[in-house]
Each structure stands twice: as C-alpha cells, then as structure tokens.
Amino acid sequence: MVQGEPPDLVPLARGLVTAAGGCPRPRVLALHKPRGVLCSTVAERGAVPVTDLLPEGARGLFPVGRLDKESEGLLLFCDDARWAQRLMDPGGLAKSYLVTVEGNPDEADLLPMRRGGSVVEGRRLEPVEVTRAGKAPRGGTRFRVVLHEGVNREIRRLFHAAGHRVRRLVRVAVGPVALEGLGPGEARELTGAEVAALVSALPVSPSGPPRAGAAGASGGSPSPPGRRRPGAGGPPRRRAGR
C-alpha cells in the first residue's frame, strides 16, 4: 500500500496505477499552457510548440485535447493513446474555464448559451453552464464556463454571437483536476489518487476501459504522437481548442 493513496491502488512502473482486479491506469501529466503557445509538436510561424514545455521523460506523451494559441491553462498529457481518447470523448469530463469578456453581457445574452441548440460546424451545441464571476478591469466581465463537448473555439464563438469579444480564456479544471498551483509553463505528474479520480469521473463506456495491452499500459516506452507501435492504436483524435 502507498501512503496517502486508497488501499485498492497499487503503483506500477513509470507512474501507472491499477485498481485491484482492473486494467492499468495511465500515466497523466498536467501542464499550464501559456498564451501564445501552439498545441502542436512542431514550431509554426515562430510560435513555440507545447511539447517543448514538457519535462525530460515526458516528450512522448499524447496531448489530451487542445487549447487554441490565444487560450491558456490546464492541458493534460497521457502515455496511452486509448486512454487519451477516452478522456477526450464528447459528453465526458467537464472542462471549466475562467473567461474575461468586453462589456457586461445581460441575461438575455447568456440565455442562448445556457439553452443550447446553436449550430457550429454542423454540430448542434449542448447547453453550457455560464456563471458570473465578477467584474474585470476596463469595463469587462468575468464568467466561469463549463463545457462537456469540444467544438472549435466554442466559447469565443458563443460570446462573439452575443456581441462580446473574449479578452482572456483560461482553462482552470478538467474533471476533478485543477490548474491551481501551476504557473505558466510549469508541469507536474498526477498522483495515483488523482488519476483514479480522473478515471472515476468518466462516464461508463459501452466498450469498457481500454485493454491492459493498449499502448503504454505495459509500462514500456510510449509511442510519440503521429507514430504507431505494432499492436497499438494510433494517436488520439484531438478535440478542437476553445
């Protein structure tokens, strides 16, 4: 038993944990993506790729979703492509954001977001949780926004449709994992208890959790993004940024 962790969790090689009788859980790293950094593995137009911020020993991890260049905050990385895909599934983990907009949207502006039904890129949007979080400098307003799906720049588009430009967008939590304590560009590995809480927060999948033999689950070296390992799934499909 590991001190401070639930008794049914057993540490494995390279940070993997497993529930008694279950398949290995993934190694997960949390990173605070700064504004201006690309969710990419290569530099583009002089912008720094987010993978350059990963610590040594974590360069081969798969990104779980993405944030657009102008957004900042919590981004997760995982050593198992199948688990990364599960963590990105629409309708799965709640993603919480602190959003600063120009002006002061009234309740009528917020109603379409809360009601849902807008169509973006051919998809009908689900209702969004929007809560006022106080005033911002220069006549702005802060909101806490919670999403469960991933449509390209969804939050920015919703506020733009209401006539209010987004000044700043920070992802502050993914499921039970919070950004708190991480400065811009800093990263840390989740504890076994945190990974267990993250996995427990996922809705039940009809196909069940990824098999123990999935990429990275054996404790071997994970495949870098864009490459396939024999018998393993390819890199997960990324969800669009906010």
Image (spheres, rainbow, N blue to C red):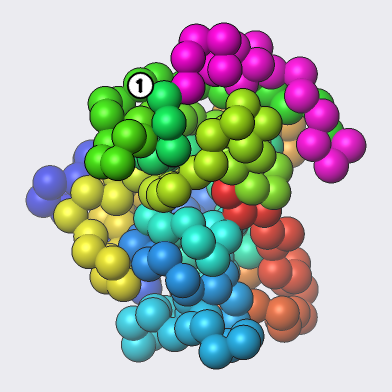
Residue located at (54% from left, 58% from top): 67
In this rendering, does residue 217 appear at all? no
Determine the image quadrant of residue 196. Answer: top left
In this rendering, the answer to whether 7 lies above or below 52 is above
- In depth, the one of 219 and 78 nearer the eye is 78
Would residue 188 be counted in the magenta stretch?
A: no
Q: Amino acid at mark 1?
A: Arg
Q: Position of residue 41 (x, y in %)?
A: 59, 82
Residue located at (35% from left, 35% from top): 140
Q: Which residues are magenta?
A: 105-122
Few, some or many C-alpha atoms within 10 Å of disc 1 (few <14, some 14-19, many ≥20)? some
Residue located at (35% from left, 44% from top): 172
Would residue 114 be counted in the magenta stretch?
A: yes
Instruction: Name the residue tied to disc 1.
Output: 132
Give the side of residue 179 with respect to residue 144, left or right.
Answer: left
How many numbered dots are placed on residues in this image?
Answer: 1
- In depth, the one of 216 and 137 nearer the eye is 137
Q: Residue furthest front?
A: 138
Determine the image quadrant of residue 109. Answer: top right
- In depth, the one of 121 and 6 nearer the eye is 121
Give the side of residue 110 with respect to residue 228, left or right.
Answer: left
Q: Position of residue 150 (x, y in %)?
A: 65, 42
Determine the image quadrant of residue 178. Answer: top left
In this rendering, does residue 83 appear at all? yes
- In depth, the one of 145 and 198 nearer the eye is 145
Q: Secondary structure at mark 1?
A: strand
